[in-house]
Amino acid sequence: MEALILEPSLYTVKAILILDNDGDRLFAKYYDDTYPSVKEQKAFEKNIFNKTHRTDSEIALLEGLTVVYKSSIDLYFYVIGSSYENELMLMAVLNCLFDSLSQMLRKNVEKRALLENMEGLFLAVDEIVDGGVILESDPQQVVHRVALRGEDVPLTEQTVSQ
């Protein structure tokens, strides 16, 4: 058996998804062109939801991808990487995202609270992963940075004293 030697890469995350109880997309960010069209992305999301929503495990191999996931009340969180990716790194991203949202939503990680705070979700995901490269895995740092960016007031809305 010939060993496959892969070049190391910083691009570890292929996608981050958040789906509701019915498998419908609430949030999806794809970092490469594995699924270039929205139709292909939706089909992949339905497939991944159908394979994972009844199980209690935390990891799956699906369509040549490594998928780590977690559920909370009425949400399903997924972090997807390639088949040769380190599962612990993907799980660190998933836990960071979940713990950051839990702190930002005051432990109320459910669909309605998430929809009311989508800007915080977008900022948190951008702080954790950029272009597939993991930037941060400490939820305290992510929450701190999101809070700082949330306080930024646009120049047009600033008063003279600001």
Image (cartoon, rainbow, N blue to C red):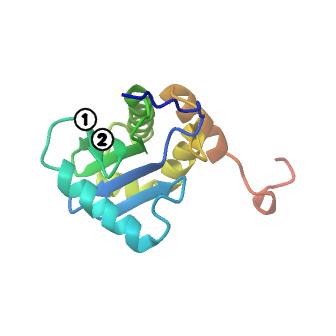
| Residue placed furthest toward the right | 160
Specify the quadrant of the image occupied by residue 24. Answer: bottom left
Label number found at residue 15: none
Q: In this view, does 150 lie above or below 155?
A: above
Q: Which residue is drawn at 25% across and 43% down?
A: 72
* Mark with earlier residue (2, 1): 1
Q: Position of residue 17 (x, y in %)?
A: 39, 52
Give the amino acid type for the residue marked by disc 2 in the picture. Answer: Tyr
Q: Which of 110 and 69 is in front in this view?
A: 69
Quarter that holds the N terminus = top left
Q: Which amino acid does label 1 sit on?
A: Glu
| Rendered location of residue 7, percent (x, y) | 59, 32
Quarter of the view holding residue 27: bottom left
Question: Spatial distance from mark 2 to mark 1, Cα to Cα?
Answer: 5 Å
Residue with the mark numbered 2 = 69
Q: Residues within 10 Å of mark 1 (few under 14, many from 20)?
A: few
Up-down: is 105 above or below 35?
above
Q: Nearer the viewer, residue 53 or 116?
A: 53
What element does badge 2 sit on?
strand
- Residue drawn where x is 56% and y is 44% of the image: 132
| Quarter occupied by residue 86 | top left
Task: Identify the residue under disc 1.
Answer: 58
Q: Is residue 160 left or right of residue 143?
A: right
Question: Left of 127 or right of it: where is 54?
Answer: left
Answer with left or right where residue 47 lies relative to residue 143: left
Residue contact at pointers 2 and 1, CB within 8 angstroms: yes
7 is higher (above) or lower (below) than 77: above
What residue lies at 33% left-to-right and 43% top-to-bottom? 67
Q: Position of residue 162 (x, y in %)?
A: 82, 47
Looking at the image, which residue sits at the far bottom? 39
